[in-house]
Image (cartoon, grey):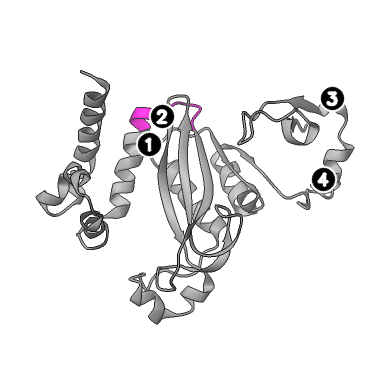
Amino acid sequence: MGEAGLWAGELESVFACVAGRFSRVDLRWLAEYAGHRVPADFQHLLNGASWDADAVRDDLQQYVAGRLGTPDGVLIVDDTGFMKKGITSAGVQRQYSGTAGRTENCQIGVFAAYASSRGRALVDRELYLPKSWTAGAGRCRAAKVPDSRGFAAKGELARAMILRALASPLPIAWVTGDCAYGQEWRMRRTLEEAGVGYVLAVPKSQQLHAPFGRIDQAIADAPDEAWERRSCGDGAKGRPAPTRRTATCARWG
């Protein structure tokens, strides 16, 4: 069996995992939609068909755990923007998009990915709804947003996904994210209480417990023996030159 046959067989096993989440038999054969030249059938499947997206997510997490799970697996949380031209897509407004690197008219999605030595895959998602949306029930209903959905900051959405992932079959040893999530003390406390390690970026103005003050000052005051050089891998422009700021990590205590 060639590589194409292996892919086809694996895709069939994925479809079998989620087939029961679709009420109609014809919608279960997702592979057939790959032959369509227009996206109408996919859009109907996602927007009009009767299916349970959260149940499919749970199936996906179980599948990823079986295929990619390792004891030292890492959960990664981050958000991304989806550019939009109109004003009716759920959650759309002018807001900062890390994807574009500037403020744009866009939707923001918060995502969780699982990574291990076996590979990586997205395992959860949440749509960020700004207060301009949650304050207007009529606008939300028009976009088919459930009435029960209230405002939640991106950090809260990420924390909810982390709790779901920790309750799933995914073996997670570490959680990581950028400073948008690292400065959320509730997230750090949740991970500490769960006994899960984390590497989360924080802004230089982050306050530490007394007597350390701001984290940038604590780093500046740390002795040389408190540091150990670690490579963070290649970036978009290749491997960065090792510097104290970008290629070292502190060992406190």
Amino acid type, label 4: Asp
Q: Which residue is mark 4?
A: 216
Q: Is residue 190 above or below residue 94?
A: above
Q: Quadrant of residue 246?
A: top right
Distance of mark 3 from mark 1, alpha carbons? 39 Å
Of labels 4 and 3, earlier in sequence is 4
- The numbered mark, 2 or 3, whose residue comes first in the sequence reads 2
Instruction: State the SS at label 4.
Output: helix
Q: Using the numbered discs, state the Cα–Cα distance from disc 2 to disc 3 in whole angstroms.
A: 35 Å
Please tell me whether mark 3 sits on a helix, a strand or a loop. Answer: helix
As drawn, the label of residue 169 is 1
Q: Residues within 10 Å of mark 1 (few under 14, many from 20)?
A: some
Q: Which segment is the magenta one?
A: 65-73
Residue holding disc 2: 69
Cβ–Cβ under 8 Å for marks 2 and 3: no
Q: CA distance from mark 1 to mark 2?
A: 9 Å
Query: Is 203 positioned to the left or the right of 110 in the image?
Result: right
- Classify 10 Å Cα crowding around label 4: few (below 14), some (14-19), many (20 and above): some
Q: Are marks 1 and 2 in contact (CB under 8 Å)?
A: yes
Q: Which residue is mark 3?
A: 225
Q: What residue is at 41 percent from the left and 29 percent from the top?
A: 69
- The quadrant of the rendering that contains the N terminus is top left
Placement of 199 over or under 103, stated as above or below: above
Amino acid carrying mark 1 in the image = Pro
Closer to the observer: label 3 or label 1?
3
Q: Residue furthest left?
A: 25
- Image height check: is 140 above or below 113? below
Q: First in sequence: mark 4 or mark 1?
A: 1
